[in-house]
Amino acid sequence: SQQGEEDPQALSIQEGENATMNCSYKTSINNLQWYRQNSGRGLVHLILIRSNEREKHSGRLRVTLDTSKKSSSLLITASRAADTASYFCATDADSEGTYKYIFGTGTRLKVLA
Amino acid sequence: DAGITQSPRHKVTETGTPVTLRCHQTENHRYMYWYRQDPGHGLRLIHYSYGVKDTDKGEVSDGYSVSRSKTEDFLLTLESATSSQTSVYFCAISGSSGALRETQYFGPGTRLLVL
């Protein structure tokens, strides 16, 4: 089973609206990351949040982390058509420092112009 | 995709044929990874390398082998390709310390079809 599970699997919104996607994981982590993947391309790193952080911002992105619930959310504010992509969370499930990350199955976001 | 190339980008092969995919980086990063991406499974780690000639297995390593003889190259070999290995394969790299260590940078991917 996946360490990270994103929810919802797919999301369709109008341009200008906010998009929220969630990630749940099973084991303790040092950090959690979010990546974006445009169709047919590789993943691009968006933001990293450490286990001792609760919220982090980067431009129109806001990430929260609740380690008690083993969950994270990614909020994209004022969405644009260019935000259409799949979004993945990744957790460092290995505490031995080998930095093996486990990726979730992703949320497909479609922003309608 | 800066600094990471994968070759070939597309390949069609037959069951039972050996296949080698190449990942080449110009960033001099220590860590390199091979993932496969399939619908409903997200990205799954096949093998990774933490230095020249130092490799370890990931989540789905059966049927795959890797080699890293130089810092810049990480090869993934399907010893005898099967239809279940039809997938998109991504290479990723990360640096040695700090933020570079924690962040993975991905290549453009290789689409492999095994008939």
Image (spheres, coloured by chain):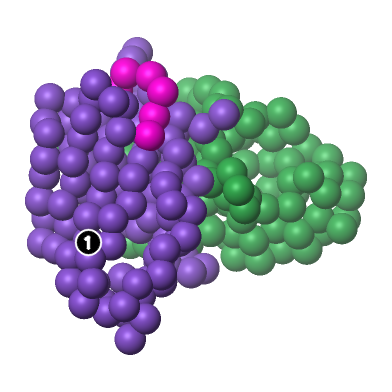
Chain colours: A purple, B green
Q: Residue furthest bottom?
A: A113
Question: Residue A12 in the image: x percent, y percent?
Answer: 41, 70
Q: Nearer the viewer, residue A63 or B5?
A: A63
Residue shown at 21% from the left, 77% from the top: A16
Residue occupying the point 51% across, 68% down: A40
Q: In the image, is A28 to the left or to the right of A103? A: left
Q: Quadrant of the N terminus of chain A?
A: top right
Above or below residue B96? Residue B112 is below
The residue lying at 35 percent from left, 72 percent from top is A13
Q: Is residue A27 magenta?
A: yes
B20 to the left or right of B55: right
The residue under the point 47% across, 60% down is A10
Q: Is residue B75 left or right of residue A39?
A: right
Residue B66 visible in the displayed image: yes
Range of magenta residues: A24-29
Magenta stretch containing residue B86, yes or no?
Answer: no
Callout 1 secondary element: strand
Is residue B73 visible to the viewer in this orientation of the structure? no
Residue A19 at what x, y percent from top left? 28, 62
Quadrant (top left/top right/bottom left/bottom right) for the C terminus of chain A: bottom left
- Kind of residue sitting beneath label 1: Ile
Dominant secondary-structure state across the stretch colored magenta: loop
For this rendering, which residue is in front, B49 or B83?
A: B83
Pinpoint the chain carrying mark 1: A
The image position of residue B33, as x and y in percent, is 47, 39
Report x, y in % for residue B58: 55, 27
The local crowd at label 1, few if under 14, some if 14 to 19, many if 20 or more residues have their Cα within 10 Å, is many
Q: Is residue A68 above or below residue A57?
A: above
Between A75 and B76, the one lying in front of the other is A75
Of residue B84 and residue B78, the one placed in the foreground of this image is B84
Q: Residue furthest top?
A: A96
Residue denoted by label 1: A76
